[in-house]
Image (spheres, rainbow, N blue to C red):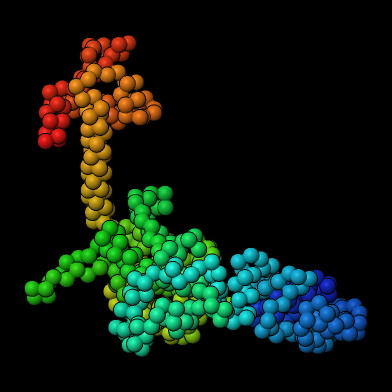
Amino acid sequence: MSESHNVEYKQSWKDEYLKWICGFANAQGGSIYIGINDKGQVVKLENIKKLLEDLPNKIVNFLGIVADVNLLNKNNGSVIEINVTPSSVPISYKGVYYYRSGSTMQELRGTALQQFILRKIGKTWDDLPCVNATLDDISLEAVSYFFAKANKHNRVAKNTQEDDLKLTLQNLDLITDDGYLKNAALLLFGKKPNKFFPNVEFKIGRFVKDDSDLIFQDLVAGNIIQMADKVIDILRSKYLNSPINYEGLQRIETLEIPEEALREAIFNAIIHKNYTGVAIQLSVYNDKLVLWNEGPLPDGWDIEHLFMKHPSRPTNRNIASVFFKAGFIEAWGRGILKITNGFINYNLPKPIFENSFGGIMITMYRNVNVEEEQEREQEREQEREQEREQEREQERNVHILKLIEALEDNTMSVSDLMDKLKLNGRRNFLYTYLHPAIKAGYVVMTFPDNPRHRNQKYYLTLKALELLKNKNK
C-alpha cells in the first residue's frame, strides 16, 4: 500500500503527528502507519510497547477522539497502525483546526475555517443570520418575480403568494429561529445585497486574443434571483450572435450557443459561489466563453465526480432550494450533464471543467467562424466609436452653449470667462470650452493675428448671437 489522500507513513512517532490525526478526523478519515519510511519500507521501530500504551491516551487527551491503535507484522518487522474515523464535530489540536486535503495537511483559518465548521454542524454560510437586516431590505418586486416563476412550474402552493412578507420568507426557510433574516434572504431578494455583501456581482468582459485585450465590460449587481436573466439579456444584446431563421412567417433568433446550457452554467455559478469571495467572472473571446466562480468542490470530490451519477451537494443549500422552487434547477445533481449534453446537441465541443484558483472554471466554445467574428467585432467597435464620438459631440455642444451664454454681448478675457463659469484649470477650459467654440465659428478673438496677445479677449459671432436668439424664443 502506498501513501495516498487517506494513508500516511511515518518512520517514527513524534507528538506533532497528532496534527495528522486531527486532519484525518476533520476530513474523510485515514490511517497513519508508524515504522514505515517514505519509500514504503518497514524500518526498526523503538519503544513499541510504550507507544501502544501512550498513543491512545494522547489522542484522547489532545484531540478528544478515540482512534484504533493496532500492532501489525509486516515484512519481518512491526508497524503501528492508527485508524482514524471521520468526526461528526470539528476537532482541533492545541486550538488549531487541521484538515487533510489530498496528500497535504492544511491549517484552517478565516473563511475556510468558518465554512468547515458550518459543514460539520450541518449548515451552510447562507444559513447564517444577517443581524443588521430588516424586512425593509427585501425587494417585493424580486419576491413577485420568484412567485411568477415558481407558479409556472407548480413548485409552490398557489395561495402562498398571498401571505405577508415575513410568513413568505419563513415558509422558504429564510428566517432563523431567532427571527433574523438569513444571508440567503438578502442575496435572493435584497434591494441592495451589496450593502451587506460587497461582492454580489457578476462581471462580464469582452476580450479578443487574451486577457490583456479587454474591449468593453459590464457589471451585473443586485439580487441573485434575477441575476441570470439580466446576464443573458446583456449577452444577447452585446456579446453573442443570434442568427435569424424563419419557420414559415415566424422570425426566430436562436443564440449561437445553447441558451439552456449557458443558463444552467450561470445558475450553477450563482448557487455554488462563495459569497465572501470575489465576483463571478465571465470572459467572452472570439471563439469561447470562460465562466469562473469562487467556491470549492464538496469534500472528497474532484472534477471527475461531477461526471458521475452523484447527489446534489450545493454550497448554499437555501439558495439552491429557492432556485429549485423557482424552476431554475433540478435537485438531482444533473447540472453538469445538462450543460455537456446541451453543447453536444448543438454540434459544439464538450465544455471543459477545471478546478482552478479555488473555484470552478468552465470553458464553453462558440459556434462562430473566428475570422468572421473578428470582422463583426471590428464593425461593432466602429459602431461603439461612433456612439462615443456622438456623446463627445453632445458634451462639446453643452460646453459651447454655456460659453456662449456666459459671453452674451460682452467681450471678455479667459480669466473673466472662467470666473463667470466658476471653472478651475485653464488648460481644461481652453480645450473643452473655448477652442471648440472658436473652431465651430461661435467665438472670435479681438486680436486674431496674435493669439497670445496680452490683452486678448473674446466675443460672439453673428452665428452665436442667432443661436442665442433662437434658444430664447
Residue 121, above or below 365: below
Q: Position of residue 303 (x, y in %)?
A: 50, 74
Query: Residue 53's quadrant in the figure?
Result: bottom right
Q: Is residue 449 visible?
A: yes
Q: Which image quarter holds the N terminus?
A: bottom right
Q: Left of 58 or right of it: where is 326? A: left
Quadrant containing the C terminus in the rendered view: top left
Where residue 45 appears, as percent x and y from the top left, is 87, 78
Residue at point 62%, 81% (across, down): 121
Q: Residue at x 76, y 70 (%)?
A: 95
Residue 246 location, quadrant: bottom left
| Number of numbered discs visible in the structure rendering | 0
Q: Position of residue 159 (x, y in %)?
A: 34, 87
Q: Nearer the viewer, residue 84 or 87?
A: 87
Q: Is residue 219 above or below residue 316?
A: above
Question: For the point 24% across and 51% down, which residue is it?
Answer: 380
Side (left or right) of 59 relative to 415: right
Q: Residue at x 54, y 66 (%)?
A: 132
The residue lying toward the viewer, choosing from 324 and 246, is 324
User: Which picture quadrant has residue 234?
Assistant: bottom left
Q: Nearer the viewer, residue 380 or 464?
A: 464
Q: Residue furthest left?
A: 249
Percent x, y of residue 99: 67, 73
Whether residue 291 is visible: no
Q: Quick check: 473 left or right of 102?
A: left
